Image (cartoon, rainbow, N blue to C red):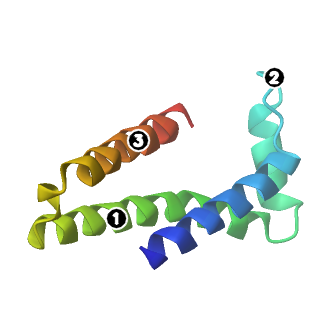
Amino acid sequence: GSLLGLCLISQILTGLFLAMHYTPDVESAFASVAHICRDVNFGWLIRNLHANGASFFFICIYFHIGRGLYYGSYLYKETWNIGVVLLLLVMMTAFVG
């Protein structure tokens, strides 16, 4: 749980820093990513932390689910269903980008 919180905070912070320099225009989106990696101080590090942090976040989620299965937490129906809904919301958010 604590690693999930740490991953979520780092994802939010790196995402905000990336959003400050990103341009979503079709013509200049690739150029803005190149600008982040080349011209922004530690932009390459922020981009890599954001990309790899997302993978680590999902690994932590799967470990959390595995721990819940191991200890039989699925017997608490309401809590388990809320967790499933949260997992689906996180997956949808990650897919959208």
Q: Identify residue type, mark 1.
A: Ile
Vertical comparison of 71 with 91: above or below:
below
**Residue placed most toward the observer, 47 or 72:** 72
Query: Residue at point 69% right, 70% down?
Result: 45
Instruction: Report how far apart the C-alphas of labels 1 and 2 lie in the structure.
Output: 35 Å
Of residue 3 and residue 18, the one placed in the foreground of this image is: 3
SS class, disc 2:
loop
* Number of residues whose C-alpha sits closer than 10 Å to that of mark 2, classed few (under 14), some (14–19) or many (20 or more): few
> Which label is found at residue 59?
1
The nearer-to-camera label among 2 and 3 is 3
Residue beneath the point at 89% across and 60% down:
39
- The earlier-in-sequence mark between 1 and 2 is 2
Q: Secondary structure at mark 3?
A: helix
Task: Specify few, some or many for label 3: CA neighbours under 10 Å numbering under 14, 14-19, or 20 or more.
Answer: few
Which residue corresponds to mark 2? 27
Compared with residue 28, is residue 57 higher up or lower down, i.e. above or below?
Answer: below
